[in-house]
Amino acid sequence: MKTKFTILIILLAINMICGCNQSEITQIDQLVPQINSHLQKGDDYYNQSAEDLNTLKTNSSLDKSNNAFSEYNSARSLTSQALSYAQSSQDEVYIQYLQLVLSEIDAKLNATSELRTAGQLFLGGDNETANENLRSANNMMLDAQEFQKQKEQLAKENPSKFK
């Protein structure tokens, strides 16, 4: 009788642990569409801002870079939340994936900051420094694309986790 009770307790503990891990993964799965939506909106605003800056619509560019920054910050906040769920579940693939997402977002935030600074410098007539900031922004976006490729490769290597 005591053995059956011990086995029952062990099975219940295993079930609870598996249930908690599954709950964490469910939370991540619910956050991912929101993260992607904010990233897409941020990318759209960033591209529009860069376009406006190229056509000398500096004020419009600054507004759109502020919007991009806001969207990227929202994505970063949600990704940090998802990463905490992944760490609780101790799922190394999700942890690595979400860390890559954070690196991508950080690169985009930095690029957006450089783009915004370039717009402000253009308004102030400091074209040379503004162009340096634009080059820096472009390099940071290239870094973001590299993180995105790494993220996509990780997803490709783990198709059961990423549908």
Image (cartoon, helix red, strand yellow):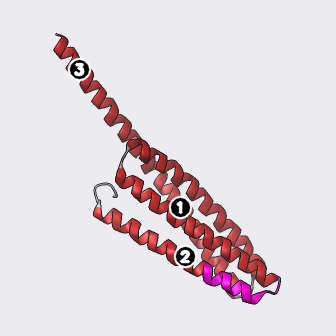
- Is disc 1 placed on a helix, strand or loop? helix
What is the spatial separation of the Cα atoms under label 3 and label 2, in whole angstroms? 54 Å
> What kind of residue is marked 2?
Met
Magenta stretch: dominant secondary structure: helix
In front here: 63 or 1?
1
Relative horizontal placement of residue 104, taking residue 16 as reference (left or right): right
Going 39% across and 43% down the picture, which residue do you hit? 89
Residue under label 2, please give it.
Answer: 141
Q: Dot 2, crowdedness within 10 Å: few (<14), some or many (≥20)?
A: many
- Is disc 3 placed on a helix, strand or loop? helix
Disc count in the image? 3
Going 44% across and 69% down the picture, which residue do you hit? 148
What is the spatial separation of the Cα atoms under label 1 and label 2, in whole angstroms? 18 Å
Image quarter hosting the N terminus: top left
Going 72% across and 76% down the picture, which residue do you hit? 117
Q: Which mark is residue 8?
A: 3
* Residue 126, magenta (yes or no): yes
Location of residue 71 in the rendering, given as x and y in whole percent from the top left corner: 62, 62
Q: Dot 1, crowdedness within 10 Å: few (<14), some or many (≥20)?
A: some
Segment tinted magenta in the rendering: 124-136
* Of the image marks 3 and 2, the number of the one nearer the N terminus: 3
Q: Which mark is residue 37?
A: 1
Q: Kindly report which numbered mark, 1 or 2, lies closer to the viewer in this rendering.
A: 2
In front here: 43 or 93?
93
Residue 154 can be seen, yes or no: yes
CB under 8 Å between discs 1 and 2: no
- Is disc 2 placed on a helix, strand or loop? helix
